[in-house]
Image (spheres, rainbow, N blue to C red):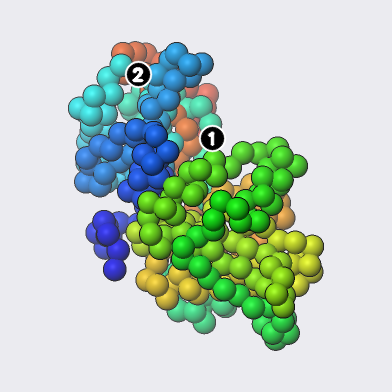
Amino acid sequence: MFDNMPHANHRPGALQQHPNFVAALRACGQAPLVLPMPYPTVILRRKLGGRLPVAMLSRPDLRVLPPEPDALRDWLLGAGLGRAPILLSPDSPCADRLDTLGAVPLMTPNSVAEIDLTIPEDQRRARLHQKWRNRLTRVETQNRLRVTECIRGPAASHWLFAADRALQRRRGYRNWPEALTLAYGRENPNQTVLFTAYDGRDPVAAMLFLRHGDAVTYHIGHSTAAGRTLSAHTLLLWHAACWCAAQGHRRLDLGLIDTQHAAGLARFKLGAGAVTRPLGGTWLWWPPLGKTLRCLAALDRRSMRGQPI
């Protein structure tokens, strides 16, 4: 069903490491480097301060590398990354491997919320938090909202983009550039899915998802005041999860969990039956310095450790 289908024992990869993401970046004039591994790995190249070149690996699955201590070092150097500083943000904890490399930890690991779409629908429903399930049952019983899905994705003029811009300004965060989101849909037909809830003829909520292989990632969403009163996002997320499962997707990535600054959103994601999974933090390695910076990282290593790969 999917292009680039991974091995059965390989967990569905992150959006940032999928060919769909690469196609969108290239359509926006960027030139990501794709390196061969047991699975292709995407590397972005940036210039800090407009001068210092940096290579960035966002959520690569380093578990696919051989377990030998120098495997990661040899792979990075063999890929031609021997001069510029390298920022690594692995998709899973691997502190021992990065420590052996000589990388310095910069940020402690975040966690993502994921819904397992491989289990039957009745079992997924049983995993819902009781209050979340009660809201879903109520909105389903009322039968007031109508949900549609559009696999072409939204046009640039769609109200969801304007609502998301306003939310970013109000809360002081930055999402993907809209041009990149539009390029993702344009370059990857049927891989951008927009779910919309209508109260009569009026749209009261929408959620946009990006498909990549056998996984799906939540991208942006918005609910009006009427939509919040009617629990429209609850209905949309449940509908989206069921639709994606029926399409053969195995995992729904709801993004980072932030219980400190976005506690309500975290409760919503976890209430939907999502399970948290730790990422690997962010590390810096500058190949010419080898392991000379390891001593600077001694105090931070404990906070960076998870289950070693």
Q: Which amino acid does label 1 sit on?
A: Thr
The residue lying at 36 percent from left, 39 percent from top is 26
Residue 31 drawn above or below residue 15 = above
Which part of the image, by quadrant, shows the N terminus?
bottom left
Spot occupied by residue 39 in the image (x, y as percentages of width and height) = 25, 47
Q: Tell me the SS state at disc 1.
A: loop
- In front here: 240 or 179? 179
Instruction: State the mark number for residue 50.
Output: none
Q: How far apart are marks 2 and 1 (CA)?
A: 22 Å
Spot occupied by residue 242 in the image (x, y as percentages of width and height) = 50, 74
Spot occupied by residue 202 in the image (x, y as percentages of width and height) = 72, 70
Spot occupied by residue 11 in the image (x, y as percentages of width and height) = 35, 57
Q: Tell me the SS state at disc 2.
A: loop
Instruction: State the mark number for residue 84.
Output: 2
Q: What residue type is labelled 2?
A: Ala
Q: Tag 1 or tag 2, which sits nearer the N-term?
A: 2
Residue 108 lies in quadrant: top right
**Is 166 displayed left or right of 96 in the figure?**
right
Which part of the image, by quadrant, shows the C terminus?
top left
- In front here: 192 or 52? 192
Instruction: State the mark number for residue 108.
Output: 1
| Res. 277 visible in picture | yes
The residue mark sitting in front, 2 or 1, is 2
Question: Which residue is outermost to the front?
Answer: 157
The residue lying at 28 percent from left, 38 percent from top is 34
Residue 269 drawn above or below residue 259 = below
Q: Dot 1: within a 10 Å radius of its alpha carbon, few (fewer than 14), some, or many (20 or more) residues?
A: some
The residue lying at 67 percent from left, 64 percent from top is 205
The residue lying at 59 percent from left, 61 percent from top is 207
Residue 63 lies in quadrant: top left
